[in-house]
Every structure is written in structure tokens, then in C-alpha cells.
Image (spheres, coloured by chain):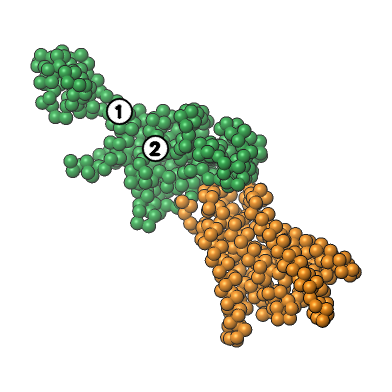
Amino acid sequence: MDSLTLCGAEMTLHQETAAGVISRENATAAVCLENLTKTFGTVRALQDVTLRVRAGQVYGILGPNGAGKTTLLRALLGLVRCDTGTVRVLGKPPADPQALRRTGALVESPAFVPQLSGRVNLRVLARARALHDNEVSRVLRAVGMQEAAGRRVAGYSLGMRQRLGVAAAMLGDPSLLILDEPTNGLDPDGMAWMRGLIRELGGRATVLLSSHLLGEVQQVCDRVVVLDKGKVVAEGSVSALLDRAGSRTVAVWAHPADVAAKVLSTRPGAVLAGGPGDSHWRLDLDRDQIPGLVKALVDGGAEVHEVRRERQSLEQVFFDLTTDRDAGAGR
Amino acid sequence: MITALAAEVLLLRKRLAPFVVGGAWVIMVVGFGFLVPYIVYATMGLSKQAGRAELLATLLPAAAHTTTAGTYPLFGGAIMLILGVLVTGSEYRWGTWTARLVQGPSRTQVVLAKFGVGAVTATVIATAALAAAMVTSGVIALTEQRPLSWPAASAVVASLGVAAFISIAWMSVGAALGVVFRGVGPALGVGLLWTLGLENAVSGLAGAVPGMEPVRAVLLGPASGSLVAALGEPSVGKGGAIGVGAYTSAATACAVLLGYAATAIAVATVMTRHRDIT
């Protein structure tokens, strides 16, 4: 099965994939969503969202503000009820007590009782899960908050609250971790720590990670879904997404520069990537058009030193996918 | 349900609010129920011997339990309403509902645990207030060189039961308001305006307009006052505390208070179950 699904022409493939495979792979899927739609008043927060997260994956949820990421996570936890569609979390409906006990969540900014210490806040949550206070000490150690745990949360920095929120999500060593923007408020050291923690957690649990920091997602996630205006616009493995999205951009190095320029400047969309006199060009080409380009350059008297398909960053892919496609079509 | 209760017990035990509310109420009972009347007694002219003796009788241990119960229909109820608002409304203020509702216990269990632990807290506060009142009345008796004649245990238990029942009903209404208005400020505003403003206005009108009496009978304050009057506490017109009066029978008063508590629990549960937590 193709690991990448893009909306548009390949949307049918995506839907068939989900519909056909969900029932077959339910046993190994940590999260299954089918045709999920949620509206708040007149705003459609989620529209026909279908996706599947296999157990053990670190799964990224990307999208601009208002794309529906947090609503999706809240739907998984049973905090919002969807208008249509089905949700299965660890094989159970959302908000099922058994599933919730095996799920840890940090949704939006971590919220605690400000007058109480970090430790007491966690003890309250641990009581609800029938966990011993030793578990609270364990998660506090895991996030490096043992020393500050006795202080009132009101005095915590944003980064400390974020760590405490992650600690709360880790209570009971859950099989599924839902982390919404876990690096918010963390300094660079904290972000690197969080990356390591997510990788470590990913070794023993399924992690659903929503983030604006695409570099972070690129580094830690196995698969991603890109949401825009409540719809899935792309879903697949990170590498497939990068390969697919970057496949038409080709970098060409040819000499002499003026000869190469004579040939390449006639090609639509070709741009000089370096400065004047440089021999580095970039243009969009399908794979089967590359031999023709090389032949044209050679026939024109140029030496072709290198032709390479460029790999975009996830950030470029993200912007390509989520910039206004209607406006793009009109250009 | 047990885990939800355990979490709620720990939360309320560690929070400052129940101690502040409870402490404030104990001070009010001792202050306005005993110390202020004792100062009035001490400064009354000797020409008003009959009035002085009547007033002192309400401050001695034999009457301490009913005097304490008499403070509930108006001020005690309002204090317990504040407690109820703080039990549920604060979770909205802090944004902690999300974390509370994803730990395993269902929404119904979490809400019922809040009402349950709130009810226990209200009962503990009522017990502390009664104990403080008894001690204060004992000190007054010793000061006035009167015998320490304590009331029968059954009478004390009955008074405590009435105080706790009234407290739980008002606390439940406050907790429901906290859920309905998703916060502390608006819930407190509406709750206090309703109970102290609207209810007193209706009660006042009912004295002049007989057609309003059935309406008064189903209000929280007058029902509480009727229940306290059933203990033998004199009504407000006969030297009793504000809000005390036999507006309705004890059975009807119990039914009204029970109705308020049940409705409050039902409203809070249904709203919490069906609302999106965003």
C-alpha cells in the first residue's frame, strides 16, 4: 500500500485505503477515524476526516491555526461529540473509561489548580486513575520536575507547566499519548529534551503529536496528516510526503553559464538559483522530462555537471498544501 | 466512582476555598449568633430585664443548637451557595475540566463526586460551626455564672441534621450555577442576587399580598426558615433570627429543599454530560 495519500486526484485512493483497511487492521490500530465531521455553529471544524494510526507509531498532526487539529484530539478523548462519523481509540469508543485509563493527554495549554503544588495537582489526577503516589514521583522524575514539584503551580514558568502537563499525560504509562503542541513555551534545550522524550515514548506507546514546529515533526514522526480547514489534505509517511511533494523541483548545474542560460531560460518556470554568472538553475520537471533537458543542454553546447531532484523541507510541503488552493488555481 | 471521589476529596482537602468559606462561616455564627447579641445583652439597660433574660436564654448552651440553626436560612445558605460555586465553577476558571475528564471516570461520576464531596464538606462546616457555637455558649454561661445545662443529644443531632440539610441544598444550587454559568463570577452574582435579592423581595411581598404565599413556600430561603422554625426556634417576628418563620410545614420544607438539591444535581449532570469541553 502506498504510504502517501494526497487529496485531490488521489483522494479516492485515500478513502478506499481507509475504508478497506480499517476493519482489517483494527486489531493493530490505536486510533481509527471514519468520516468524522464536527461543526461549531456555522463553523465546520472537521469535515469527513478519515485516518488510521497504527499502534506504536509516532503520528504528527499538522495544520495552520483553525485547521481542526485540537478539535480532532478532543474528539478522540470524547471531549467534543462529532456530528457524524465513527471514532475508535484503542478499540473503544471515545471517552470509554478503559480506553481513557490507557490514554494520556495534554490538550492545548496545560491547566492546573494554580494554588496547589505540581505534585498535588498530579496526585489528584493519579487518584482518578487509581494510581499510587509513587507513579507521581516517577513521572516527575521523567520530566525533570522533582525539585520544583513542591512549589505552587502559580509560580511556574510556561515551560515548567508544559513539563508538568507532559508528566500528567504520562501517568500510568499509557498505551496512547496525545500531545497537543508539547513544545510550547520550551527553550531550545527543552525542545531538544522533548524531542528525545517523544522518541523514547514512541518506543513503547503510540504518540499522536500536534505541532506547529514542522522541523520537530519531521524529526520525530513516522507519519503525518495535514489538515486544512477541517479537511485532510495529505496523509502518509514523512519521507513519502517529502518525496512526493518535492518530486517536480530539479536542480541543474551546467557550464558554461551563458550557454546553459541560453537553453534553460526558454524553459517555463526555470530560475537561476545562484547569482549572475552562476550555473545553478532550478525548475519544475516531471521525472520523464529530465533526459530531454539534459539532451537539450548537451546539444546546446553545455556540459551538464549535475542534475538532482530537490527534496523539500516539511515546512515547504506544508505551505504548498495549506496555502489557499482556490487562489492558487486562479493564478 | 470511588476513584472520582478519591480525587475530589484530595482536591478539596488541599484547596484553600473550603477552609476560607468554612472558617468565615464559623466566625459569622460565633460573631453574629452569639458575640454580637451578648454585647447587646451586656449593654442593655437594666429597665429591660425581661428582654435581657430572653436574649440571654438564646445564648446559653441549652439553646445553642437552635440559635445556630437559626443563622442558616439567610446567611448560612448564602455562604454554602458560595462553597458550591467554588466547587464546580473554579474548574472552568482554571481550565482544568479537560484534564479531569480524561482520566477514566465518566463525566457523570466526576460531577456526582463533586456534589458528594461538596455535601460532606458542607456537613463538616455545619458541624464545626455548631461545635464552635456550643463552646461559645458555654463560655457565656460561665461568664454569666449560669449552669452549664446542655441540650439533649437528640435535639443537637436534629439541629445539626437541619443545618446540614439546608447547607447541602444551598451548596448544590451553587454547584449547579457554577456549571450553568461555566465560572465563578457570574454564578456568584446570579446566585446571590436570586437568593438574597429576589427571594427576600418575594418573601416581603408575600407578607402583604396573600396570593404570593404559595410562591414563597417553594423558595429556598423560606423553606430553610420553615425547617428551622420546626426545631422550635422562634420566628423573626418573635425575636428569632432573620429568615426563620413557619411559612410552610416541615414536610413541605423538606420536600422543597430536596427538590432544589435533586434538580441542581440533575441540571449539572445533564449539562456536563452533553456539553462539548472546548
Chain B: give its colour. orange
Q: Secondary structure at mark 2?
A: loop
Chain A: give its colour. green
Amino acid type of disc 2? His
Q: Position of residue B241 (x, y in %)?
A: 71, 74
Camera-side mark, 1 or 2: 2
Which mark is on residue A212?
Answer: 2
Question: Which residue is more in the foreground, B109 or B24?
Answer: B24
The answer to which image quadrant residue A62 occupies is: top left
Q: Position of residue A273 (x, y in %)?
A: 21, 23
The count of marks equals 2
Q: Residue at x 37, y 57 (%)?
A: A41
Q: Residue at x 38, y 46 (%)?
A: A68
Residue B55 position (above or below residue B10):
below
The answer to which image quadrant residue B251 occupies is: bottom right
Question: Which residue is more in the foreground, B238 or A71?
Answer: B238
Q: Secondary structure at mark 1?
A: loop
Question: Which residue is more in the foreground, B269 or B131?
Answer: B131
Q: Is circle 1 on the same chain as circle 2?
A: yes
Q: Few, some or many C-alpha atoms within 10 Å of disc 2 (few <14, some 14-19, many ≥20)?
A: some
Would residue A273 be visible to someone looking at this image? yes
Residue on which the image places disc 1: A312
The chain ID associated with circle 2 is A
Which mark is on residue A72?
Answer: none
Question: Which residue is more in the foreground, B147 or A81?
Answer: B147
- Report how far apart the C-alphas of labels 1 and 2 lie in the structure: 17 Å
Say whether disc 1 or disc 2 marks the residue closer to the N-terminus. Answer: 2
